[in-house]
Amino acid sequence: MVTGGASGIGEGFVRHLAAIGMNVVIADLDADGARRLAGELGSGPARTIAAQVDVTDPEAVSMLAEQTFARFGSVELLVGNAGLETAGPLWEVPVARWRQVMAVNVDGIFHTVQAFLPRMIEAGRPAVIANMSSVGGVSSAPLQAPYIVSKHAVLALTECLHQEVALTGAPIQISAILPYSVKSRIFTSAQASAPTSDPVAARLFDAMQAANVAAGLDPVEAAAHMTDALAAGAFWVFSDDDAGIASMRARADQLAHRSPPRSPHALLAEIEASAVPGAERWH
Ligand SMILES: NC(=O)c1ccc[n+]([C@@H]2O[C@H](COP(=O)([O-])OP(=O)(O)OC[C@H]3O[C@@H](n4cnc5c(N)ncnc54)[C@H](O)[C@@H]3O)[C@@H](O)[C@H]2O)c1
């Protein structure tokens, strides 16, 4: 089961899991995208099913779980991946957009856990729930606060859940995924659905999009790497081990030394430089 499976990292997981012979449910708000992908993979060895779902709707997610268990009898891997970015200074983010980012990125994970975990425990088979945080879940960044807040929340939720499931003794592995840059539509979708009027935020998102195109990992290769880490039992799973571990180390150092958040100017300059080598620096 891959939520947000019609694009980007989720699509990478769908393609990789189908290629290694797993039956996959592509659960996405984008019904056409999910159907197209299922159709394309339909001739392979695995069954690939498209399901339209809005992860912000607990009843829809519950129905998805019911139908999936009715069809397959068990779910061995749930990737809680659907997510949204948003640009702009926090004081200018529309209330509705703040709520939407929290509803998809955080409530969506909560709803999938509530719908799938009890059924996974009841099925009694070893299984994995992997929730999509980000390296942004262990760091801070300006002009995308709702997203960063949501990814810290997903990480905290996942750590608590890991402990709670361990108390039950059920053979369910709970893992957190912290991707770095993987090619996807996340920045262009954010700017299309909730464009910011702040010029620095707009420039930041353009630079992040350009960096994503220039240096983001291939989603299928990233998914293969992350699937191997999940299969090896890791709690912390990265798309890029070096970048993920560097982010965690920087956070640990910051907390240990009680340092204030990193200079936003240095961070913005770094992002822009990674997008267009030699480009004019941020001021
Ligand atoms: N791409 C990266 O570099 C990166 C880095 C760190 C974390 N992430 C995380 O990876 C996840 C996937 O992002 P992506 O980069 O592949 O983005 P993407 O925009 O390419 O894909 C997101 C998918 O989620 C779906 N979706 C959005 N709202 C939904 C809803 N309410 N219900 C069901 N599906 C919904 C979209 O239709 C889309 O198919 C997100 O949680 C994101 O925060 C991505």
Image (spheres, rainbow, N blue to C red):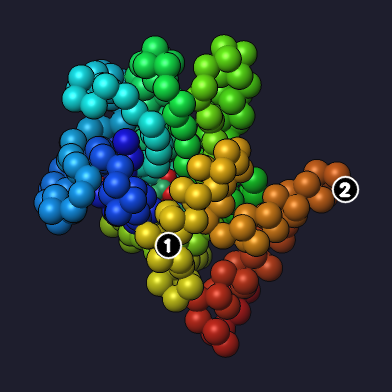
Q: Provide the residue designation for mark 2.
A: 257
Tell me the kind of residue under disc 2.
His
Whether residue 235 can be seen here = yes
Q: Work out whether 249 lies above or below 118.
A: below
Quick one: label 2, few (<14), some, or many (20+) residues within 10 Å? few
Q: Provide the residue designation for mark 1.
A: 221
Quick one: label 1, few (<14), some, or many (20+) residues within 10 Å? some
Image position, residue 229 (x, y; %): 54, 48
Residue at 50 percent of width and 25 percent of height? 172
Residue at 56 percent of width and 43 percent of height? 232
Residue at 45 percent of width and 66 percent of height? 217
Q: Mark 2 or mark 1, which is nearer to you?
A: 1
Q: CA distance from mark 2 to mark 1?
A: 36 Å
Quadrant containing the C terminus is bottom right
Image position, residue 136 (x, y; %): 57, 49
Tell me the kind of residue under disc 1.
Glu
Whether residue 199 can be seen here = no
Image position, residue 215 (x, y; %): 48, 73
Secondary structure state at the residue bearing disc 2: loop
Residue, far right? 257
Q: Work out whether 173 lies above or below 167.
A: below
